[in-house]
Image (cartoon, rainbow, N blue to C red):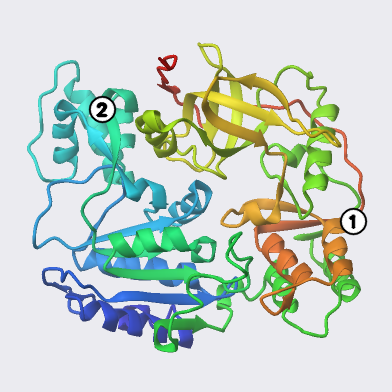
Amino acid sequence: MSSTTLTFSDDQATAFDMIAELLRGVGVDIEDTLLTPARDDGAGVMAVIGKAGSGKTLLLAELYRALEAAGVEVVSGDYEGRRRRDRRTLAILAPTNKAASVLRMRGVPATTIHRILYTPVYDPEYERIAEWLAGTGDRPEIEGLTDEALDRAAAFYERNKSIPGALAAAGLRGSDFITGWKRREQPLDIGFIDEASMLDDRQFEDLKDIFPTLILFGDPAQLAPVNQSGAMVFDALPSPRKLELHRIHRQEADNPILDLAHALADPDLGFEDFERLIEDTARRDDRVVWGQRVEVDLMARSPVLVWRNATRVRLINAFRTVHAAPEDALLPGEPLICDGIELPLKHRKKRLDLEARGLIKGAQVVYLGPGSRAGFARLHVIGAEDPQVSAASIIKIEKPDEEEPFIPQAARMGATFLHGAAVTIHKAQGSQWDTVQVFAPDIWAAARMGRVEAGQPLWKRLAYVAITRAQDRLIWVVRNRLSKPSHPLRVDDLRARPAAALTLEMQEEG
């Protein structure tokens, strides 16, 4: 622990030591860098909980670095070599692509829960490259790949530890080297789960089946998953298995956005008092803005956060109107949210293909244009490691006061999408953006209703989640108005890579 004492606050240091002791009990000694073979029973579940700014992510990152230094291998979901009895592994997971990408930007090799539940099947020819990059095989000779291409792959892997990314750097597409996906059959070892407040009971049971040792990192002040009755999966853990971080980390101490979020813990604070606090903060710090209108330019990459579904639909249609979007088509650059996959059971493999590329429920996507086949769309999946894909798509745009959505594009079956210029605060959990716009009239409406969730006024939980989605700047929008766009929708700011086609070969039922 001595190497991290200067970094941690007291409660972080205590949590680090308790997790180190738990890991030592299952044969992973991060102080003496000593590893012994895994036990089948593992250590069970432990949770680190704390509000925004309490240092959960810092603690997770330091634990990852200590495990890596001890010789534990990180399983990314991209590729796994042959199993060895003496190998100890760690997987760092998040419920969504966006949440995983937040960790990756901090140097933590995270992936989604789905990418661990389902593993890729590699073409045997290209698996030799993966084995070489992972250090378990010799440098291969592959027909059609030059030494320079292999060198590019090795250089990429040295920096990023991503097998698909390295193979892409060599000039290959996912469809060249991944032949399919299968549900994981063998358990893993140690699992870290970030944003654990988003887990539902079914996901939690799946994870406990896979990881004998599971450590959750979550915020108890967020909104519980839908249909969970206000409870989070770590609530039922016994006290010794729940490590709570109370102190705000010193790096976050001068953050007006977090100050506002933590002010909501005051039981005597009413909605009007809170708005006065926001207005006062905005006068002295430009990281908080008292907004008189929704800034439409931000909506293409950072959705407006709302509570009521009717507000979401109105804002989406206002966004499309000010951009002069046609009634019968999408414009390149329009934001979308994946609403799931509509495929029958017989197309299970195609479902895995789509989900493995990041098209899971709640994924943020930018529309790039129509695909080469009818019903297909070219898409950029925000936060995915290989973000650009062409897939059969069913795109729905809801209209105010209309029961049926407008559908500008539809395959017979495939990935389904809703418009993403505005999203509910519930769906925004796990995501962060540089600048976040919160539609305050919706929070006020929740306050007027007087609803309580898990012992706290609902409006406070909504405000807390919405505010803590902002990394750098918070805009508290107090009026139902929309600005005019300063530029047309764009896609040139997205990372350019060739879109790998995910072909859905559909046949009529006999």
Q: Quadrant of residue 44?
A: bottom left
| Residue 389 image label | none
Position of residue 432 in the picture relative to residue 391 (left or right): right
Position of residue 406 in the picture relative to residue 364 (left or right): right
The image shows residue 192 at horizontal and vertical percentages of 37, 64
Compared to residue 343, the image places residue 291 above or below, namely below
- Give the SS element for disc 2: helix
The image shows residue 224 at horizontal and vertical percentages of 60, 66
Q: Nearer the viewer, residue 18 or 209?
A: 209
Placement of the N terminus among the 4 image quadrants: bottom left
Q: Quadrant of residue 286?
A: bottom right
- Give the SS element for disc 1: loop
Placement of the C terminus among the 4 image quadrants: top left
Q: CA distance from mark 2 to mark 1?
A: 51 Å
Position of residue 34 in the picture relative to residue 386 (left or right): left
Q: Nearer the viewer, residue 248 or 232?
A: 232
Residue at the extreme front: 510
Q: Nearer the viewer, residue 486 or 204?
A: 204
Q: Residue placed at 23% from the left, 37% from the top?
A: 154
Q: Does residue 112 appear in this view?
A: no
Q: Nearer the viewer, residue 280 or 356?
A: 356
Q: Residue placed at 88% from the left, 57% from the top?
A: 441
Which residue is identified by label 1? 478
Looking at the picture, which amino acid does disc 2 mark?
Phe
Which residue is identified by label 2? 177
Within 10 angstroms of label 1, few (less than 14), some, or many (20 or more) residues? some
Looking at the picture, which amino acid does disc 1 mark?
Val
The image shows residue 345 at horizontal and vertical percentages of 40, 33
Q: Residue placed at 28% from the left, 26% from the top?
A: 170
Within 10 angstroms of label 2, few (less than 14), some, or many (20 or more) residues? many
The image shows residue 399 at horizontal and vertical percentages of 81, 33
Q: Quadrant of residue 407?
A: top right
